[in-house]
Amino acid sequence: MHRRLIAALLLACAGTAAHAKDNMGYDFDRGYPTPQTSERTRADEVLQTAVVTYRFWYPTVSVEGIFNGTRTAGIQDGKEWGIAAAGPRQVGFTLNSDTPYGSAVLDLSQGPIEIDLPPGPYIGLVNDHNQGWVKDLGLPGPDAGKGGKHLILPPGWKGTVPDGYYVARSPTLKNLLAVRALPVGGDIPKAMDALRAVKIRRWSEGGASSPALEAVDTTKRAMDSSSLRWEDNIQFWEVLDKIIQEEPQNPAFLPMYGLLAQLGIEKGKPFNPDDKLKAVLVNAAGKGRSQMLVSAFDSDRPDRKAWPDRQWEWVGLVPGSAQFETPGGIDLDARDRWFAQAIVTSPAMFRRDPGAGSLYWLGARDAQGAYLDGGKNYTLVIPQPVPDKLFWSVTAYDAATRSQVQTDQVNAALRSLFELKDVDQSKPVTLYFGPAAPKGHEDHWIKTVPGRGWFAYIRIYGPEAAAFDKSWKPGDFVPAK
């Protein structure tokens, strides 16, 4: 009796070992995957590869959205660049109305590009086609606001550069130049003229150069410089393939090129996904975007909180970095968080000290922790004086487009140089947000849209020590009673 029981138990154990399942429910026969397990694993692997790839290359596709927006507005690469006193009609990830700005596509395929920056209060940068930092210009740059000639060299360029230039080398052929002219004293026309004074031209070793790009004012044009139209469908991958074909490979990205090749995107080869792969890629785009938006607006990282008793969060989570570098490697979650909300990077943007050019705080929730609702009215108390050497603002953004809220008010910002220029510096100022104008406070109100979520950025330009040592802090959004 006992012998038969022991034999049965041994046989059962042998059967368990022979037909084991892992903790994901995958079947294995004597240690080998079954045909069903292999098929399921391959499908999972393709989807996982596509999601990881989507998140890594999102900044690349995003910056192509900026290029596409300017081209769609009729601005020609190599001939013109756009300048604007921007507002809600310019769709782009967390663009703001604080300062006029200019942007240009720098095409290095024919050689270096020279940027002549006059002395003055400019904040500028160059990012490559992957939104990698190339250089700063103006106040945060090597010219420190004194003006100078900046030269951007293409990848592999072996020529010589004479003295007198601030030089940087880009790993990509297409680059984005973004320059802001600070409106000192609230003088927007003067700031726009300062942008027109910036000269961008092709440079050659012989000293001859091409004519400077013409500045085109797009202030009154509706523009979409985002990647919204591509980010959740097959176009994301088609746009990415086009960039991969046009740009040289970056040695630092070799593992990510390998993942792309597994999905059929490889330099020098056509991208022709079949219907099955297309379905996977579309699925991955949706999942990847969702994961990035969770990092952006529902992170549980403790380092995101600017103050322990407030809902305001740091937008950039790796202080002083250019590409979210930490001693342990690249903080990919912080990278996702930034690029889901915003565009361009520079170490100057993420500094947390009084020498920083500007800082950004995100407010997506009210005082009770609920997401901000465009159908509700809120108040926000800002203590005075705000610790800024230059100026400060609060801007409201649509959560779905990550762009300034669009209403018939045609305004999404309250700014110390404009709407708030006469605020009493001896007492806190109350700001208002919601679909209904507060009687008697219309000048301190931003209109929001019922049925749509929204969030806000507080920006401080020339932040002082109190902005970092927690001795100054704003209130939270409080729902109106």
Image (cartoon, grey):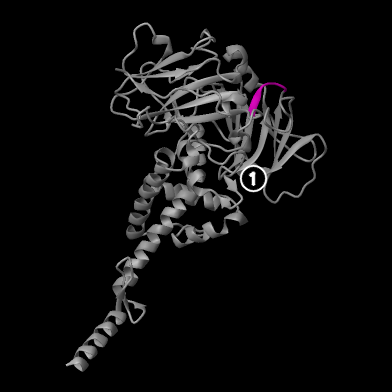
278 sits to left or right of 125: left
Majority secondary structure of magenta residues:
loop
Percent position of residue 382, x then y: 48, 18
Between 463 and 225, the one nearer to me in the picture: 463
Residue in the image at 52% along x and 12% along y: 418
Report the magenta residues as a range.
119-123
Screen quadrant of the N terminus: bottom left
Count of numbered marks: 1
The amino acid type found where label 1 is placed reads Ser
Magenta stretch containing residue 122, yes or no? yes
> Which residue is outermost to the left?
1
In which quarter of the view is residue 192 placed? top right
**Above-or-below relation of 416 to 374:** above
In which quarter of the view is residue 38 placed? bottom left
In which quarter of the view is residue 127 placed? top right
Q: Residues within 10 Å of mark 1 (few under 14, many from 20)?
A: some
121 sits to left or right of 57: right
Percent position of residue 404, x then y: 43, 26
Q: Secondary structure at mark 1?
A: helix
Percent position of residue 35, x then y: 31, 75
**Above-or-below relation of 124 to 411:** below
**Above-or-below relation of 30 to 177:** below
Screen quadrant of the C terminus: top left
Percent position of residue 73, x then y: 48, 29
Between 394 and 408, the one nearer to me in the picture: 394
Judging by the rendered image, the residue that carries numbered circle 1 is: 109
Between 359 and 189, the one nearer to me in the picture: 359
**Above-or-below relation of 114 to 58:** above
250 sits to left or right of 8: right
Residue in the image at 31% along x and 81% along y: 17
